[in-house]
Image (cartoon, helix red, strand yellow):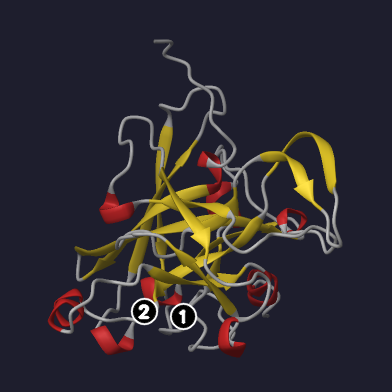
């Protein structure tokens, strides 16, 4: 095997997050990079950064990025303090009830780091239809598992369980069906790469290369029923998961 292995764009868009509280690893999760007007943000779930109900108050987040586009073995660890000297949170959010947060990391990754961020250009065009039951990908780090040699994430399959882009029960999210695990919180949900697009109203469109659309950000199970309770009630987990619409990232990164 060649020592110099290139990096897939999707692999360079995500990173594993380690939340550190009282100098100990409190949890691991997933984040992805997003470009807003030339600023690069690290996007994840709010509950990764703070979860008042679970006494989850990490002080720092650590993540690893690639530093060489032609050699996947070369990486650098970055540490982010989550609060300034006055104790004010440094991430952006629009509502504590919306489980999405963004952290401006432009300065941290500007020094020789190699990332390929998503942007608004990766949203689904208005004339393109994503049908219910469509296959989608969840890119992340289930149970913290990843390729530690090459710093590469794991890709899981899921399907759209609700009618995209209709907000499920009026909420700013949709549902996907998949057996997912802790560690994928904050994962980007994307369409499978394809050069055949379904056009609203019927018909298809062929494009050069493969398109990948950013649909949303994985959050948590819906509804949340502990596995023990589900078994006691005579059924297994539903394997339904909340995914916030990707457009929320545009709103959050616009917060001043």
Task: Classify 168 as above or below 149.
Answer: below
> Which of pointers 2 and 1 lies earlier in the amino acid sequence?
2
Q: Quadrant of residue 179?
A: bottom left
Residue under pointer 2:
50
Residue displayed at 50% across by 49% down: 14
Asked whether the beta carbons under mark 2 and mark 1 sit within 8 Å of each other, the answer is yes
Q: In the rendering, at what x and y percent does residue 44 appear?
A: 48, 66
Can residue 107 be seen at all in this image of the molecule? no
Residue 27, by quadrant, is bottom left
How far across and down, in percent of the image, does residue 19 sit?
31, 64
Q: Is residue 140 left or right of residue 161?
A: left
> What is the x, y in percent for residue 189?
54, 57
Residue at figure coordinates x 65%, y 69% from the top left: 164
Dot 1 alpha-carbon crowd within 10 angstroms: few under 14, some 14 to 19, many 20 or more: some
Looking at the rendered image, the quarter that the N terminus falls into is top left
User: Which of these two is toward me, 168 or 16?
Assistant: 168
Which residue sits furthest top?
Answer: 1
117 w.r.t. 132: above or below? above
Left or right of residue 102, residue 237 in this image: left
Q: Residue at x 63, y 81 (%)?
A: 167
Q: Nearer the viewer, residue 254 or 200?
A: 200
Residue 142 appears in the figure:
yes
- Bin the neighbour count of mark 2 within 10 Å (Cα to Cα): few under 14, some 14-19, many 20 and up: some
Q: Which residue is mark 1?
A: 89
Lateral position of residue 242 relative to residue 112, left or right = left
Q: CA distance from mark 2 to mark 1?
A: 10 Å
- Disc 1 secondary structure class: loop
At 13% from the left and 82% from the top, the residue drawn is 232
Q: How many marks?
A: 2
Screen quadrant of the C terminus? bottom right
């Amino acid at each position: 095997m060649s020592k110099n292995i290139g990096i897939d764009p999707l692999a360079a868009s995500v990173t594993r997050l380690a939340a550190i509280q009282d100098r100990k690893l409190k949890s691991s999760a997933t984040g992805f990079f997003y470009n807003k007007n030339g600023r690069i943000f690290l996007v994840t779930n709010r509950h990764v950064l703070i979860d008042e109900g679970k006494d989850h108050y990490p002080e720092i987040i650590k993540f690893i990025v690639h530093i060489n586009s032609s050699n996947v073995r070369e990486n650098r660890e970055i540490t982010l303090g989550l609060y300034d000297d006055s104790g004010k949170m440094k991430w952006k959010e629009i509502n504590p009830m919306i489980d999405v947060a963004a952290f401006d990391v432009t300065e941290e990754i500007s020094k020789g780091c190699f990332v390929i961020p998503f942007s608004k250009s990766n949203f689904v065009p208005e004339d393109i239809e994503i049908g219910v039951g469509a296959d989608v990908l969840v890119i992340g780090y289930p149970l913290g598992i990843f390729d530690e040699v090459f710093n590469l994430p794991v890709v899981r399959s899921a399907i759209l369980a609700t009618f995209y882009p209709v907000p499920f029960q009026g909420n700013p999210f949709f549902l996907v069906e998949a057996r997912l695990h802790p560690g994928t919180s904050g994962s980007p949900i994307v369409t499978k790469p394809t050069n055949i697009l379904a056009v609203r109203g019927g018909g298809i469109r062929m494009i050069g290369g493969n398109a990948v659309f950013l649909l949303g950000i994985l959050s948590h199970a819906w509804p949340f029923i502990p596995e023990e309770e589900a078994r006691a009630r005579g059924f297994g987990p539903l394997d339904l998961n909340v995914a916030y619409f990707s457009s929320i990232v545009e709103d959050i990164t616009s917060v001043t």
